[in-house]
Image (cartoon, grey):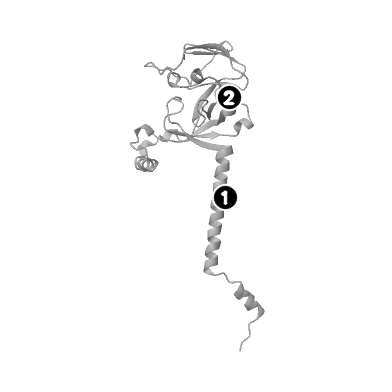
Amino acid sequence: MQKTTVQEKEATSAKVTPDALRKSVLREYAEALIIAVLLALVIRTFVVQAFKIPSGSMLPTLQIGDHILVNKFIYYLTPLTRGDIIVFKFPQDETRDFIKRVIGLPGETLEIRGRQVLINGVPLSEPYAVYSDGPIARSGDREHLGPLVIPVGKLFMMGDNRDHSMDSRVWGFLDEHKIKGKSFMVYFSIRSEDIPYTSIPFSVVYVLTHPSMIRWGRLGTIVQ
């Protein structure tokens, strides 16, 4: 009878069964998936988050149906400046996110005279602001305000679509601690007002089968 050598025994014991191999592969996929999910959560929480523009308060800068990216850590590195377009918790309902432009900074004196905003008595140049020639969506006195001093830690926010924006003229100052981040890019944009579905799956299928719904020229544009 032929004797089995020690090397042969070791080789035999080292053989991996199909079940063990399958479990090993599944474990690798599971670990990779868990890591990917954790990274996505970290990025979404601390780095970049995606938001969709549902209203026209920031027209023409941001269109209804724009999907934007928001930098959530930038203000840890650089100071907030006038003109920044930021996403924040709506002061009257913090379950909702709003997006507006920073107009007044802490310690400044702000006044609104008709369509002119003054900061410390000096007229502010606002090439991004638009006004309606039709009926105005009024809530509070939008054309006459101040002069008022912006408190420390607060901001005065306004939408670019001045006659159709619920902003600091209505709900007051924004606490800086409510800021979620600064918008910096439109990564996707669709003519969402023309989509005949409210269901997300049906909407996705509709857009994929109707490429004309996509605003191709807005993809990758910088928000400013």
Q: Give the Cα distance between marks 1 and 2.
A: 35 Å
Q: Quadrant of the N terminus?
A: bottom right
Please state the horizontal and vertical placement of residue 199, each as a whole percent of the image.
37, 40
Determine if residue 202 is in view: yes
Numbered label attached to residue 45: none
Q: Is residue 184 above or below residue 36?
A: above
Q: Is residue 100 above or below residue 187?
A: above
Dot 2 falls on a residue whose secondary structure is strand
In the image, what residue occupies the spot 63% across and 77% down? 9
Determine if residue 191 is in view: no
Numbered label attached to residue 175: 2
Please state the horizontal and vertical placement of residue 52, each as a whole percent of the image.
46, 34
Q: Nearer the viewer, residue 218 or 159?
A: 159
Nearest to viewer (mark 1 / mark 2): 2
In the image, what residue occupies the spot 36% across and 32% down? 193
Residue at the bottom extreme, as displayed: 1
Residue ID for mark 1? 35
Please state the horizontal and vertical placement of residue 122, each as a whole percent of the image.
56, 11
Q: Nearer the viewer, residue 220 or 200?
A: 200
